[in-house]
Structure formats: structure tokens, C-alpha cells
Image (spheres, rainbow, N blue to C red):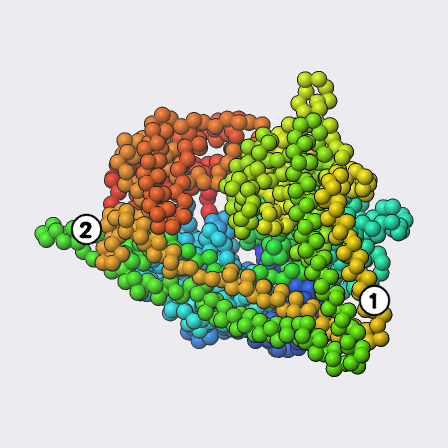
């Protein structure tokens, strides 16, 4: 082979592994087939380091040894994600050869992939399906397929259903594609389902490049293209609705004729709270003769998933791989540096990222002896976790919350700092995850002067932008153009779908170097990068700020590393004011989360199962009703009981309960070894009678004195709370005292907080806070406290304070350790200004009411929430606790409290003297060994209780409730006269509802059957429909523009009439315990009316308070709903005509999505 040829072959290796070709003309008649595998006369093999864990490295030669090692406990490994094990059907695979990207075979003269597919199909047609094997299917690709891909294809060819669990971007789609090649070559059909329309559109484009335009179809709520094709791409809800028509059987009406294979992509969505039911229903309803290929990201329990599918659907094989084809390297970005997150072994945090190291580095001095005293006052959120086994004093040192906040804030990098490191280290392109649209847009503006493109690339972007502007003039995001020309862009739900697709195309071409994106980009969209940057470890949710789960972190990290291009991918975590490297390692090492069943009943499910989806008509002659062919209640129950949750509960729950019982028995046995009687018995045996008698007498005295000490501690606590009440009431006007809050965390560590007292909640003007305390059960006081006068009025029992750490604290008197004489004067700074107490009260009411719990007791809890920037200036005036003296403590001026405290102190000293006296006895050394052994047993019991608690939580997660919910929904259906659940007679309302796709099918059917809609014009009908699907659409408060088109009076009147029906349905739902939402909101109806009336996109978006993407989403939802109306049974023809007209008018650029 010539040098030139070798060079060309080497260069071809460097091309992206999954190429995108322009669409080529395809034959009008499907005539696929492929050649038999031809061995090459020349081939080159390149051996790189075997892809390994991003947390540890080993040589490729050691791979077999690594796979043969025994599996370690969860506590001893970094994360389950990185175990180097490839298994089939739950067994460890010990095949010797590993097929991966490290061993590439370059094929010559085989043409493009679509040409190789066509040749294979032609050969199958000539020689028969018997020639299809794993090698023939692998020959379609110009690289050697991976080991787990080969195993999955072999399982498919054996006729089994397959569950594949592998990391993000590892090449799971190849398995589905190979199955499609085999299925098409046999002349049969394959359905490929995805959870997202955007992902369906992407797969549609990719499969057309492989199989040709005529042989691939698309079916989503928006599009129906070539729906009889051999390879049909669709969203999961579409397939579920198909299966409703013939549960468990292939019939002419089900749409599954000639379908041999169904691919469920992103099957880990089964854990999604709102949509997980759909995946379970598909598996349950799918005919057993259809093979399932389930593709999942790495999860903790793939064996449970495959076991469940095997039990209800038939033979199923599990193929798992935790290896990434491109290994990951983890980094941590700080103000002036980009350091490795992990140590050399990849099992612990890099010591140079520890808080103590950073503090010493900043101070350039060792910690002083006085600093050690702060350990006593460390806070729960300030207690650091050491990932280093070094026992040095440096690692044992504890820092206060203020120290930690100061260190973290000093190390927070600006975006430009991190970006400079990425560019200088050749780590671009990058996907930069920021958990807010506003943050993504702001980041683009911040770096839009940072040039990342050379002149040639910038010219290509300008040309592409010019073409895009000509084709979609209204879809151009003008505010993003400047950044785009520099190589940066934002990608989030606030952008138009067309613009996002344009950004994705430029990114894949290497013309965008950094994409600032929200986490939705991690959900399967094909935008691999060299680096993934995760800007924060927490995100805002309905429950306040929550840390990312390990699954979420690894899903985003999976975007890093381009197969066939990058030798390593990079993941960069960023220092924030609230999270550092410790928190990053905690999430990374926490282990994967299991799939959890979210099976819930819906109106569509009940109607289609019990009514069979058959229309009910009265006979013209007899007047009798015709029964439908639906399932009986017993048959429906058998189906519902096949849910994943019930499978897990019947197997895993049984095993967990057995282990819990075993643990409890062992704990009971161990407890008997550490009782006073057991210790006494061991002491008699180990000591002489004289020694035993001396220690026994001292021990009995010690127990008695400790009982006295416990009683005095209770008296001291009661006296403290009694003394505090009058002290706090004195400060309601004229003075805001400083105080110390104190609590112990779950690990028993005591924390102290300096704060300024604002007052009782009921004395403040914070109405949002009062409403929250009254409405949220978590703030209720324990009714066991029978003598408490406060339990009847929780608002009057809670106090508010602002901490020195700029956190608001909500607490009862129980958590106040002491009140100080000094404080902030509650007087206006300038005559006529507002008093500080009122200013801070107003600031508190502006905060999001997202409070996190620190501690609980029968006297109420201690809660906190982060303060705003405005509150920060006030928190700076709160002194640290060490600056106060005992003379400042007002509690010590209470004689009753002083007396009890003195008694308690004296009793504590008495106990200490007894313990010291015992330690000097002759037999204490042997006795102490017995006590040490008892402490060891206590620690073991503690660990076992932790394990038991973890198992109990697991059981609570998987406790099924499917049939109960099914019957609750059935009762609502029966009461609304949609279906007779006993006779399976479905009435017109139920017939309409059973054909609808939506969150509350019964509510939508009621609306569509309402006569008030018949008088509406198409634009008005569209406005009303928009009010049914506007849930989640919001006015964006950061937008300078604030205009929204108001709905017409007619639409407002119709919404008012429908609201009465809605209230009636909600009352019935509440009666039967059903909580399915009934959306009806007129806020955005006018925007849709304006669009249908003919306004251009620029006109409607001028001064608009809604993001482009949100309005486009609302319009597409409305189109989807309108498009369903003409297909629904028993709907007035006038309504169908108006709905069709409105849908046609609405579906125009820039919101019309051309899927091809």
C-alpha cells in the first residue's frame, strides 16, 4: 500500500464517526438489500488506550483482570456509572475481545452507509433472510462496532427483546439502526419511538440518510409523513394510542400490521413523574410477537427493568455497559485556575480544592491555634466533608459558615475566566449548561466580544445566517447575532425551534464553539462536544434550590467527548457562592438512582381499556344500547397489576423486607450485648469480686447522678424558653436585638448562628410568609404538645431573623440559645424614612418562599432561605458570635434561669468527678475494654439502622397504588356519564374523550361537546383552545417589554361559561380523590387570536412579554389540539370545519416545523 493511500486512510479516521450526508435521490420503489460481507485486502488497525473510567485509569492490557475482580460495596467505589463491566442478562461477560473505537477497520470502496444498506437488502432478497447475522449487519458501518453493540444485536437476532443500558453518547442508536436494517431487509416494519418531538425529527432525518426518503416516515402530534413506511419514527404517546385500539393483539385497526420491532428510545423516561406511565403502558399493551428494543441511559436497576419486561412480554435479554467510548476527565473551575477535580486515582477529591487549603493559600499562613475553637460553632451547611484519608491537622480543621462563604465567594470565576482556560487548553467546542434562560442569554452577551472564530469560520457563519434569514426572516434572533458571529450562542426553550435547529447545525459543523444551554439539551439531542461545562450544582425547583442528582449530572456530562474525534472528553464543574468541590464530589460519588415506576391512571386509559374505544349508538329499531368490546374490570386489573411498580414491589420489595427483618433481628441480638445487664455480666467475669464491687458502686452512683443531670437539663430548657418570651416582647419597638440560634444536625453536630431579630411573624407585614405558614403542613406544630397555647396559631409561634450569612431564619423560641443586649436601633436613618424593621420585612416578603428545613422538634422547626443582594448589606451589620461576651447575654439577667443553669453546671461537674474517680480504680482498665467493645457494637448497630432506613425508603419509593387510582378515575367517569364501568357501555362523551390526546381527556371532551363553541369564529375558537393548553407558559419578569394582546369579549365570555363546567368537574374529582388538572386560562388567548387573525410574527412579538419559544410552544400546542378536533367522533361538523380552518391558518412560519 502506498504512503499516499495510508495517509488518506489515516485522515479518514479523524472524521466524525457518525457522518451527516446530504440527502441523495432515492428509488421510488423500496428495493433495499446489501452485499455479503467482503473481507478487505488492506486494512489498518489503530490501537489507543482502552476507554476507561473517568475516575480511574488502567492499561488496556489489564482490562480482563479488572473485569474479573469482585464487585465492591457502594461505599468503596467512586460511582456505579464507572464500573468497567459489560454484562448480558445480568451476568458478567468474560469474552476476551473488546470491540470499540480503539480498534478501527477502514473499509475501502464500499461507498456510503446508505449504499451498503441497499446492497445488503438486495442480497437478502436474492439469497434469503438466513444470511443476516451480526457480521453482515456490522459490515454496514465503516468502523468496528463495540462489544455491547455486538451483544445486543446478537440477542435481537436470536428473537429476544433487548434492554440496553449504557452511558449517554455511547452509541445505543446503532443497535436500533442495525435492527432496522435487518427488519427492512426482511420486508417487515419497525417503529422507533422517542419522548420528544425534536428528537423524533432528528431521528427522522438521520434514518432517511440511511434508508432513503421513501422508506422512513414520521408520526408526531404535528406531522404525519409517509406513515406506511417500513421505518416509522414517532413519539411515545402516538404509539400508546395506537396500542389502545387493540390491547395485546395485532389487528387491522391497531396500526401494528407487519410490525416486527418496536424501539423505545430513552426508556429511562419511565421514571418521569408526568409521562412515565406511557412507557409502562406500551410494554404492557404491546403484542408479545413484537420484539422490543429498550434503550436506556445508565441506571441503578436495569436488571429490574429487563426482568419486568421478560415477565410480561416474553424472552428479554439485558445488555449493559458502563464504559464510555470516549473517557471523561473531570475539572473544577475557580477564579484563577482550572484544576483536576479528582486525585490521581480518581476516587477522592483533589486536596488542592479543599476549603482549608484554599484558605491557607489565600492567607499564606498556617491556621492559628485560636481558630480551632470555631469547630464548636460550625454550622450544618458549613461542615465540610473530607474525601482525603490524610489524618493531618489541616484536613481535620473545621471552618465556620462565614469562613466558607468568604472562601467560596473569593473563588467564583467569571465566565470569561473559565472560557479563557477552555480555549487555551484546546477544550472547545463546549456545551455550557446554565439552569435558566436568562442566564444563558446573559452569558452570550457577556462573552460576545470574545472572538472564538477565525476569519474563514466567521465568513461561513455569516453566509449560513444570510441563507437562514432569507428562508426564515422572522425566525432570526437579532439579539443573538453578534454573539453568533463570534462563535457563541444560547439554546433554550425561549428560542424558536427553527432557530435552535439552526444553532445545532452550526455547532455540529464546528462554527459555534460554545453553546450556553439549559438542561433540556442533555435529553438526547445530538450535539456532542469536546467539553461539557456545568455552571451550577443546584437548580431552582418547586421545592426551592435542589442539588442535581447523580443521574442528571452524568446525563449532562455525557455530552462531552466526540466519538472518533476526541481521545478524551472534559467535564468542567464551576465554583459558585453556594457549592464547591466537596459538593461536586458528593453528587458524583453518590451512586446512580434507580428507575421508579410512575404508573398512574388517566381518563384515556380507563376509557380505552374498559370501553375499548368503540362508539356507542342506539339501535333505530329496538332502542337498546350496544355493548363495547372493552375489558372487564377483572381483565383490566390484571393489566394494571403488570405495572413496573407492582413487579418491583413483588420481587425487590420482598427481598428488601426480608433483609430488613434480618437486620432487625441482628440489631436486637446486638442490643442485648450492650445492655447494662450484659455489661454487668461481662464485668463480673473479667474482674475480681473486689474490683467489680468497687466499679459497680461507682457506676450505680454515676447512673443516679446522670438521671439528675437529665432532669436539670430539661428544667434549664424550660426556664430558658420562659425567660426569652418577655425579653423578645420588649424589643417589638425601638430595638432589634442580636441573638444566637443553635441546633444539632442529623449527625449530632452542634451549630450556632448569629442573627438580628426582626420579631414574631404575626407582628410583621410579610403577608406571603404568613400565608405560607398557614397553608404548608410542614410548619404545623406537634399536637402532642398539649399545653402549648401556640399550636392553635402557628403564625404567632414563629419568629424571623436575618443571619450574618445573609440567610433568613424562621424559628420558634425553642431554637434561640440566647439574646444579647446589643442590637440594631430600629430608627430611620433620616427623619421621615422607613424604619429598618419595616425595610427588612419588605425585603423578606419579596423573597421566593422556598424554605429549607434545618431541624425539627415538638415545639416547631428551624428553617432558612438565602437572602437577596439587598438584604446582604443588612446582614453585614450582624457581629460574629465570638465578639459577644457573657455580660451581653440577657438570659443571664433572669434569676430563675441563672439558678437552674448554676445547678446544672454543678451537677455536670459532679458527674465528671465521678467518671474521673472511676478511671482511677484498679479494675478500670479491663472494664474500659468492655465499654470500648460496647461502643464498637453501638457503631455497628448505627450502621445497620442506616442500612435499614435506606431499604425502607426504597420500599416507600416503589409502593404501588395503580389499581386504587384506576378505580378513582373510573368513578369520576361513571358519575359524569361517560362510561358504565360494569357493562362497558361507553357513551358519546366517553367516546370523544377516548380519542383525545391530552392531560385531562375528559375535560377536553366536555369542552369540545359544549354548544357554546359552535358560535365561535376560527380565530375565537383558537383563542379558547389556547386557554386549554397554556399551562406552564409564563410572562417573563426580566423582559423590558410587557405587552400581551387581550382576548376578545366573546372569548372571555366563553371562558367564563366553561369555567362553571370546570368547577363542577373539579368538585367531582375532589369527591373521588382524583387530582388531574383541568387547565383553563384566558391570559394568553388574545395572543393566539391575533396570530390567527393574520398578524405577522414581528407584529405579534413587538413589545411582547412572552419569550419567542414560549409563544411558539403555545401556538403549536393549540394547533395540535385543533388538529385533533376533526378526527374526534360525535363532534359537530361546524366545530370540525372551524377547527380545521384555524389550524391551517396558524401553521405558518416561523412556527411551522418542517420535519424533513
**Residue to which mark 2 is pinned:** 617
Q: Nearer the viewer, residue 1147 or 387?
A: 387
Q: Is residue 1135 left or right of residue 762?
A: left
Give the quadrant of residue 67: bottom right
Q: Position of residue 810 (x, y in %)?
A: 63, 41
Q: Which residue sits at x=28%, y=55%?
A: 613
Give the quadrant of residue 937: bottom right
Q: Nearer the viewer, residue 451 or 963?
A: 963
**From this viewpoint, which residue is outermost toward the left?**
621
The 10 Å Cα crowd at callout 2, few under 14, some 14 to 19, many 20 or more, is some
Helix, strand or loop under label 2: loop
Label tally: 2
Q: Position of residue 969 (x, y in %)?
A: 35, 52
Q: Which residue sits at x=33%, y=62%?
A: 636
Q: Nearer the viewer, residue 474 or 414?
A: 414
Which one is earlier in the sequence, the residue at label 2 or at label 1?
Answer: 2
Q: Which residue sits at x=61%, y=55%?
A: 549
Amino acid at each position: 500500500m502506498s504512503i499516499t493511500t495510508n495517509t488518506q486512510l489515516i485522515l479518514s479516521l479523524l472524521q466524525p464517526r457518525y457522518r451527516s450526508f446530504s440527502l441523495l435521490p432515492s428509488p421510488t420503489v423500496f428495493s433495499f438489500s446489501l452485499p455479503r460481507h467482503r473481507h478487505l485486502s488492506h486494512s489498518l488497525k489503530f490501537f489507543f488506550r482502552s476507554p476507561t473510567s473517568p475516575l480511574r485509569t488502567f492499561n488496556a492490557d489489564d482490562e480482563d483482570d479488572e473485569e474479573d475482580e469482585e464487585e465492591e460495596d457502594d461505599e468503596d467505589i467512586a460511582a456505579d456509572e464507572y464500573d468497567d463491566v459489560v454484562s448480558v442478562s445480568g451476568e458478567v461477560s468474560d469474552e476476551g475481545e473488546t470491540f470499540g473505537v480503539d480498534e478501527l477497520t477502514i473499509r475501502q470502496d464500499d461507498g456510503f452507509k446508505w449504499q451498503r444498506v441497499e446492497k445488503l437488502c438486495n442480497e437478502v432478497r436474492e439469497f434469503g433472510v438466513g444470511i443476516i447475522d451480526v457480521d453482515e449487519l456490522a459490515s454496514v458501518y465503516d468502523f468496528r462496532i463495540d462489544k455491547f453493540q455486538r451483544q445486543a444485536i446478537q440477542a435481537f437476532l436470536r428473537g429476544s427483546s433487548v434492554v440496553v443500558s449504557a452511558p449517554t453518547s455511547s452509541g445505543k442508536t446503532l443497535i436500533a439502526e442495525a435492527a432496522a436494517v435487518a427488519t427492512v431487509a426482511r420486508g417487515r416494519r419497525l417503529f422507533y419511538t422517542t419522548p420528544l418531538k425534536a428528537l423524533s425529527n432528528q431521528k427522522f432525518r438521520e434514518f432517511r440518510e440511511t434508508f432513503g426518503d421513501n422508506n422512513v416516515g414520521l408520526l408526531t402530534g404535528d406531522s404525519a409523513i409517509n406513515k406506511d413506511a417500513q421505518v416509522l419514527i414517532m413519539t411515545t404517546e402516538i404509539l400508546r394510542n395506537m396500542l389502545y385500539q387493540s390491547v395485546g393483539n395485532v389487528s387491522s385497526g391497531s396500526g401494528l400490521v407487519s410490525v416486527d420491532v418496536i424501539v423505545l428510545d430513552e426508556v429511562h423516561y419511565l421514571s418521569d413523574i408526568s409521562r412515565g406511565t406511557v412507557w409502562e403502558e406500551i410494554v404492557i399493551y404491546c403484542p408479545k410477537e413484537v420484539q422490543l428494543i429498550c434503550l436506556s441511559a445508565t441506571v441503578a436497576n436495569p436488571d429490574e427493568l429487563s426482568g419486568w419486561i421478560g415477565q410480561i412480554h416474553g424472552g428479554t435479554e439485558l445488555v449493559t455497559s458502563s464504559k464510555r467510548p470516549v473517557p471523561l476527565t473531570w475539572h473544577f473551575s475557580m477564579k484563577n485556575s482550572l484544576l483536576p477535580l479528582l486525585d490521581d486515582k480518581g476516587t477522592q477529591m483533589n486536596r488542592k480544592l479543599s476549603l482549608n487549603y484554599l484558605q491557607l493559600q489565600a492567607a499564606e499562613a498556617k491556621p492559628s491555634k485560636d481558630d480551632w475553637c470555631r469547630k464548636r460553632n460550625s454550622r450544618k451547611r458549613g461542615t465540610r466533608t473530607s474525601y482525603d484519608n490524610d489524618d493531618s491537622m489541616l484536613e481535620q480543621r473545621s471552618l465556620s459558615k462565614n469562613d466558607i462563604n468568604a472562601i467560596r465567594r473569593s473563588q467564583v470565576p467569571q465566565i470569561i475566566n473559565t472560557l479563557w482556560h477552555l480555549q487555551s487548553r484546546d477544550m472547545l467546542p463546549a456545551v455550557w449548561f446554565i439552569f435558566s434562560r436568562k442566564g444563558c442569554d446573559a452569558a452570550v452577551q457577556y462573552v460576545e466580544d470574545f472572538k472564538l472564530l477565525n476569519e474563514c469560520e466567521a465568513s461561513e457563519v455569516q453566509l449560513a445566517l444570510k441563507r437562514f434569514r432569507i428562508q426564515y426572516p422572522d425566525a432570526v434572533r437579532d439579539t443573538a447575532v453578534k454573539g453568533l458571529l463570534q462563535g457563541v450562542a444560547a439554546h433554550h426553550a425561549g428560542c424558536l425551534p427553527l432557530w435552535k435547529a439552526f444553532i445545532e447545525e452550526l455547532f455540529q459543523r464546528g462554527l459555534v464553539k460554545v453553546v450556553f444551554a439549559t438542561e433540556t439539551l442533555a435529553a438526547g439531542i445530538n450535539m456532542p462536544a469536546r467539553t461539557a461545562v456545568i455552571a451550577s450544582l443546584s437548580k431552582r425547583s418547586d421545592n426551592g434550590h435542589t442539588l442535581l442528582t447523580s443521574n442528571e449530572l452524568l446525563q449532562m456530562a455525557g455530552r462531552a467527548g466526540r466519538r472518533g474525534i476526541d481521545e478524551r472528553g472534559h467535564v468542567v464543574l464551576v465554583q459558585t457562592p453556594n457549592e464547591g468541590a466537596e459538593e461536586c464530589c458528593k453528587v458524583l460519588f453518590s451512586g446512580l438512582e434507580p428507575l421508579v415506576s410512575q404508573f398512574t391512571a388517566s381518563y384515556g386509559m380507563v376509557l380505552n381499556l374498559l370501553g375499548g374505544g368503540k362508539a356507542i349508538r342506539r339501535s333505530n329499531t329496538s332502542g337498546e344500547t350496544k355493548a363495547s368490546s372493552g375489558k372487564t374490570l377483572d381483565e383490566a386489573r390484571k393489566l394494571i397489576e403488570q405495572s413496573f411498580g407492582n413487579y418491583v414491589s413483588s420481587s425487590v420489595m420482598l427481598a428488601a423486607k426480608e433483609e430488613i427483618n434480618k437486620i432487625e433481628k441482628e440489631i436486637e441480638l446486638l442490643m442485648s450485648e450492650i445492655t447494662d445487664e450484659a455489661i454487668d455480666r461481662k464485668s463480673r467475669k473479667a474482674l475480681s469480686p473486689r474490683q467489680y464491687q468497687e466499679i459497680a458502686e461507682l457506676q450505680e452512683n454515676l447512673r443516679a447522678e446522670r438521671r439528675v443531670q437529665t432532669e436539670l437539663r430539661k428544667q434549664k430548657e424550660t426556664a430558658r424558653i420562659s425567660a426569652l418570651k418577655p425579653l423578645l416582647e420588649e424589643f417589638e419597638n425601638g430595638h432589634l436585638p442580636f441573638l444566637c440560634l443553635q441546633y444539632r444536625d442529623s449527625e449530632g453536630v452542634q451549630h450556632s448562628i448569629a442573627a438580628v431579630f426582626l420579631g414574631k411573624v404575626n407582628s410583621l407585614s410579610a403577608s406571603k410568609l404568613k400565608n405560607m405558614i398557614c397553608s404548608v403542613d410542614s410548619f404545623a406544630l406537634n399536637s402532642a404538645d398539649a399545653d402549648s397555647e401556640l399550636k392553635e396559631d402557628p403564625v404567632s409561634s414563629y419568629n424571623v431573623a436575618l443571619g450574618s450569612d445573609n440567610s433568613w431564619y424562621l424559628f420558634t423560641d425553642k431554637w434561640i440559645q440566647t439574646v444579647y443586649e446589643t442590637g440594631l436601633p430600629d430608627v430611620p436613618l433620616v427623619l421621615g424614612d422607613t424604619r429598618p424593621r419595616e425595610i427588612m420585612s419588605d425585603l423578606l416578603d419579596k423573597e421566593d418562599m422556598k424554605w429549607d428545613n434545618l431541624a425539627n422538634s415538638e415545639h416547631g422547626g428551624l428553617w432558612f432561605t438565602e437572602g437577596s443582594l439587598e438584604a446582604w448589606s443588612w446582614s453585614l451589620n450582624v457581629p460574629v458570635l465570638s465578639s459577644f461576651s457573657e455580660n451581653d447575654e440577657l438570659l443571664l439577667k433572669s434569676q430563675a434561669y441563672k439558678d437552674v443553669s448554676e445547678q446544672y453546671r454543678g451537677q455536670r461537674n459532679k458527674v465528671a468527678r465521678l467518671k474521673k474517680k472511676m478511671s482511677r480504680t484498679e479494675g478500670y482498665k479491663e472494664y474500659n475494654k468492655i465499654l470500648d467493645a460496647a461502643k464498637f457494637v453501638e457503631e455497628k448497630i448505627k450502621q445497620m439502622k442506616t442500612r435499614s432506613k435506606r431499604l425502607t425508603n426504597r420500599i416507600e419509593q416503589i409502593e404501588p397504588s395503580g389499581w386504587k387510582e384506576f378505580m378513582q378515575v373510573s368513578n369520576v367517569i361513571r358519575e359524569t356519564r361517560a362510561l358504565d364501568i360494569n357493562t362497558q357501555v361507553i357513551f358519546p362523551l366517553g367516546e370523544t374523550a377516548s380519542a383525545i390526546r391530552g392531560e385531562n381527556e375528559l375535560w377536553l371532551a366536555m369542552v369540545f361537546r359544549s354548544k357554546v363553541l359552535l358560535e365561535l369564529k376560527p380565530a375565537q375558537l383558537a383563542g379558547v383552545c389556547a386557554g386549554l393548553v397554556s399551562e406552564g407558559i409564563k410572562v417573563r419578569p426580566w423582559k423590558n417589554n410587557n405587552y400581551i394582546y387581550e382576548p376578545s369579549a366573546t372569548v372571555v365570555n366563553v371562558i367564563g361559561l366553561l369555567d362553571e363546567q370546570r368547577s363542577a368537574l373539579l368538585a367531582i374529582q375532589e369527591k373521588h380523590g382524583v387530582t388531574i388538572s383541568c387547565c383553563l386560562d384566558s391570559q394568553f388567548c388574545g395572543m393566539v387570536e391575533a396570530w390567527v387573525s393574520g398578524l405577522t410574527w414581528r407584529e405579534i412579538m413587538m413589545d411582547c412579554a412572552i419569550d419567542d419559544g414560549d409563544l411558539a410552544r403555545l401556538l403549536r400546542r393549540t394547533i395540535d389540539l385543533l388538529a385533533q378536533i376533526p378526527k374526534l367522533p360525535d363532534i359537530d361538523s361546524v366545530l370540525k370545519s372551524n377547527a380545521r380552518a384555524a389550524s391551517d391558518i396558524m401553521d405558518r412560519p416561523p412556527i411551522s416545523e418542517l420535519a424533513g
